[in-house]
Image (cartoon, rainbow, N blue to C red):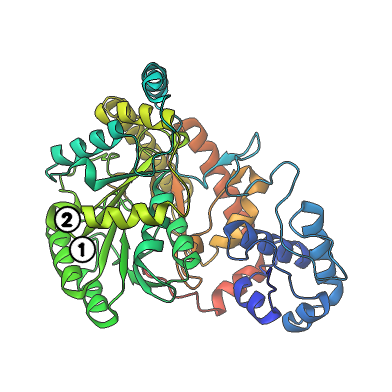
Amino acid sequence: MPGSLNPTALVRLLGSWNSGALPAYRELADVVRLLVMDGRIPLDVALPSERSLAQTLGLSRTTVTAAYANLREQGFLTAGQGSRGRTCIPHRTAPASMPGLAAPEGLLDLAYASLSAAGEVVHRAFADALTELPALLPGFGYDAVGVPALREAIAHKYTAEGVPTTPEQVLVTSGAQHALNIVLRALAGKQDRVMVEHPTYPNALDAIRAAGCKPLPVALPAGTSPAWDIDAMVALMNHQRPAMAYLVPDFHNPTGRIMSDLQRRRLVRAAASAGTVLVVDETLRGLNLDGVRTAPMSAFGSAVVSIGSLSKSHWAGLRTGWIRADEDLIARFVATRTVMDLGGPVVEQLAAARLVRSFAEPLDARLEELRHNRESLLGLLAEHLPEWELERPRGGLTVWCRLPSPCSTALTVLAPDFGVRLAAGPRFGVGGAFEHYMRVPYTLPPAQLELAVRALRAAQDKLDASPQLRRTLKTERPAAVAVA
């Protein structure tokens, strides 16, 4: 049954929403809208009544009424009975910062770290796949494990990287997120603990919470040496005994860091001793901009579950991913998968098999383009936002920036007015952390990155020009953050 949100819980989610940069009703509506778009307020949830929320916030009821009216006008709140409207998404054109939908024309999208397709290579793979399709048409088309040609190609790829793998150790999925949901459902029950890096990939946090599990964050150290606090991870595993650990050791999202082989080896041994299954997200491993040499995590122990996909390296529209694990675990994952769906689309898998077999073909040009974009973005940020502290990524698609004040959510709310769509720092953490941080992708070409950074400068200036915001930032303790 749909739920409701009490005023105390909503106020806690709102945080320091009233910056003074806009009228109070507009700021309240904007932050509630952002919470809905980020998934921190689920859909079809009844918001508090106007009267109760006004009393809890210490505002006039008129202000709350105007904020709710604004949300209804934008399509984020149903009319409902009285003032208990329910959260929803617009049926008309999506607003600028609506996750899951493309940004409207004229807006630069810095919310997603994704690339367009590796054009000719992807096109050719689909054309070739159609020539192979007739051989499979006599079958039913359902295959919960995956098309054999793709499983063989994935197994060969791991073997070539020093991790001997058979097709029986591979399960094909509809992307990495689908893979993670299968693993969570198979290995972690409700209320089980799952260790995560802090910050981490937002959709992974969403999946962990949706599975009824409790994320246990371990902060990444300030600076990049060491890149991970393995001592803290080992101590947490020994003390808390989490059922799983979800990690992104290869060009970590959002920081772009890469874990050393020494750290990988120690972590795998500690997890085996604690009975914690290491689930490793390798979707960014191919985007190695600095030529760093590391072995896959599964090279250091048999109890590692590896998740991969072609979404970041080739094209997210393929919706093809995989799980690599021991055969007994793959059998559990297949049994779990069959209650969720009966298999992925065949043509996409045939195309993916060709792309995996020639995995590196589009990467040289793609990596060179990304290196150029990265240098452009780092230079633009240093020039136009010198007060932002930047962490230089070794690979991947994003730069993790520390802001001079805890204004990430406010900046995200304001940014569409300046032509930019952002993802707020708290999306990457637990408990409202990372208001001091912003993830900025370098997936756009340099000319568009320049426009985006200039827009960020204008939005930051508008926030800084608010005396009320300056007083708030001066007297308030920022939310605890993992990277200090």
Q: Quarter of the image containing the C terminus?
A: bottom left
- Give the total of numbered labels: 2
Residue ID at (19%, 54%): 297
Residue 350, image quadrant: top left
Per the rendering, the mark at residue 226 is 1
Is residue 416 shown left or right of residue 343?
Answer: right
Residue ID at (70%, 53%): 89
- Say if residue 403 shows up in the picture: no
Which callout, 2 or 1, points at the residue further toward the start of the chain? 1
Per the rendering, the mark at residue 451 is none
* Front position in the image: 227 or 388: 227
- Mark 2 highlights which residue? 260
Q: In the rendered structure, which amino acid carries the disc numbered 1?
A: Pro
Q: Quarter of the image containing the N terminus?
A: bottom right
| Disc 2/disc 1 C-alpha distance (Å) | 9 Å
Q: Is residue 421 above or below residue 208?
A: above
Q: Nearer the viewer, mark 2 or mark 1?
A: 2
- Say if residue 231 shows up in the picture: yes
**Spot occupied by residue 150 in the image (x, y as percentages of width and height):** 30, 34
**Spot occupied by residue 46 in the image (x, y as percentages of width and height):** 73, 69
